[in-house]
Amino acid sequence: MRRISIFLIGLALFTSTLCKAQKYNFKKTAYAKLKGVDVMVWVIWNSLKNNFEAAFDQYEKWGIKGIKMDFMDRDDQQMVEFYEKVCRKAAEKR
């Protein structure tokens, strides 16, 4: 089976529309799985940082295969440490 990836925007995950986002994203990832499509989610790094454990747990429940983190706009030591933290958590959830 051929594997391709699609992206979902993860911004609504931790807003007041959490229930709607969960239903929508779960339906999309379940359908994608039936079709042999892997799903990745695009997130803003600060949103991920503020909801780190909960976000990774939710993405795992949805069957998300990867994340794309955006808007870091810096390369200081704190950001590099955050990159490493994200990589470790993603590997753990693999």
Image (cartoon, rainbow, N blue to C red):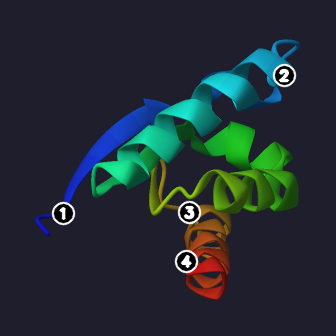
Which residue does the image show at 46% across and 63% down from the upper left?
A: 65
**Quadrant where the N terminus is found in the figure:** bottom left
Q: Nearer the viewer, mark 2 or mark 3?
A: 2
In the rendering, which numbered label is found on residue 76? 3
Q: Read off the residue under disc 1.
A: 3
Q: Position of residue 16 (x, y in %)?
A: 88, 13
The mark that comes first in sequence, 4 or 3, is 3
The reply to whether callout 2 and callout 3 are in contact (CB within 8 Å) is no
Which residue does the image show at 60% across and 62% down from the upper left?
A: 79
Q: CA distance from mark 2 to mark 1?
A: 29 Å
Q: Nearer the viewer, mark 4 or mark 1?
A: 1
Which residue does the image show at 57% across and 32% down from the upper left?
A: 27
The mark that comes first in sequence, 2 or 1, is 1
Horizontal side of 52 relative to 3 (left or right) equals right
Q: Nearer the viewer, mark 3 or mark 1?
A: 1
Q: Read off the residue under disc 2.
A: 19
Q: Position of residue 38 (x, y in %)?
A: 34, 56
Looking at the image, which residue sits at the far left?
2
Q: Nearer the viewer, mark 4 or mark 3?
A: 4
Where disc 4 sits, the SS reads helix
Q: Read off the residue under disc 4.
A: 87
What amino acid is found at the position of numbered circle 3 in the picture?
Asp
Residue 93 visible (yes or no)? yes
